[in-house]
Amino acid sequence: MTAPDSLPLHALAEHNLASASPDLLRAMIKTFADALMSAEADALCNAEYGQVSDERVNHRNGYRPREWDTRAGTVELAVPKLRSGSYFPHWLLERRRRAEQALISVVATAYLLGVSTRRVEKLAESLGVTQLSKSQVSAMAKHLDEQVAAFRNRPLDTGPYTFVWVDALTQKVREGGRIINVHALIAVGANADGHREILGLDVATAEDGAGWLAFLRSLIAR
């Protein structure tokens, strides 16, 4: 299962998530989209969900379901409702394809490298979301990073796996002002029913025995 050498790391993750684990990709898209909508609704209310605040100008009033067709399949979104007025994410109305690509790209990068406030800021900027405060961005990044960690460490309960493919891709990335080589380690499994999924996707600074051993041990532990 060798990916083209020209793929950057985030594109490699995106390619493999879309082809081998569309269910996981849909779940991660939903997590990121729902978190972004929740942050937008909080900004419109001028207070976090459930927070008691004298500065609050509106209240949340449940959710309404909304289907979003993406390349990974249909994503079931939960759009926040407001007690006064209405809310709907403009990026789902005006920039559907751009929003899809931006979310998938951030999801793929986050799956590899984790979630940072800068990645959340860039996602919001790319979708035209400008009303989020620094504290909202920070809280959103923390929540999403926890969710990504849960995805990455989820139990591998669809086995036993009849086949397991492992591969690695080397890329040059900038870190701390210098260019270094990093290696994306990938494991994809297929069970007796033919169901394929990404078992693990990690980044190491050296493609050596120690890196592979740690990667494979982490899979066995799950």
Image (tube, rainbow, N blue to C red):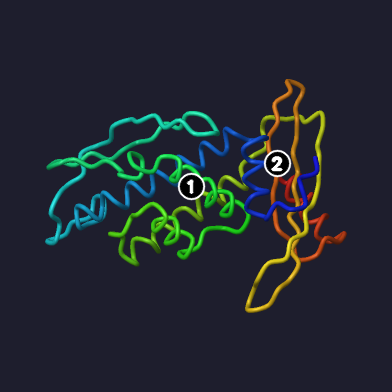
User: Residue at the spot x=65%, y=48% of the render?
Assistant: 13
Q: Secondary structure at mark 1?
A: helix
> How many residues crowd around disc 1 within 10 Å: few (fewer than 14), some, or many (20 or more)?
many
User: Residue at the spot x=38%, y=35% of the render?
Assistant: 77
Above or below — where is 90 with respect to 20? below
| Residue 12 image offset from top left, x and y in percent | 68, 48
Quadrant the N terminus occupies? top right
Q: Which mark is residue 149?
A: none
- Choose top left, top right, bottom left or bottom right for residue 60: top left
- Choose top left, top right, bottom left or bottom right for residue 53: bottom left
As measured in the structure, the alpha-carbon distance from the residue carrying label 1 to the one carrying label 2 is 21 Å
Query: Which amino acid type is shown beneath numbered disc 2?
Result: Leu
- Choose top left, top right, bottom left or bottom right for residue 171: bottom right
Quadrant the C terminus occupies? top right
Label 1 or label 2, whichever comes before in sequence order: 1
Q: Farthest right residue?
A: 209
User: Foreground: 55 or 8?
Assistant: 8
| Residue 31 image offset from top left, x and y in percent | 45, 43
The residue that label 1 is drawn on is: 103
191 to the left or right of 99: right
Image marks 1 and 2: residues in contact by CB distance under 8 Å: no
| Residue 157 image offset from top left, x and y in percent | 66, 33
48 to the left or right of 147: left
User: Foreground: 120 or 157?
Assistant: 120
The residue that label 2 is drawn on is: 199
User: Residue at the spot x=79%, y=49% of the render?
Assistant: 216
* 1 or 2: mark nearer the eye: 1
Q: Secondary structure at mark 2?
A: strand
113 to the left or right of 179: left
User: Residue at the spot x=57%, y=45% of the render?
Assistant: 151
Q: How many marks?
A: 2
Query: Which amino acid type is shown beneath numbered disc 1?
Result: Leu
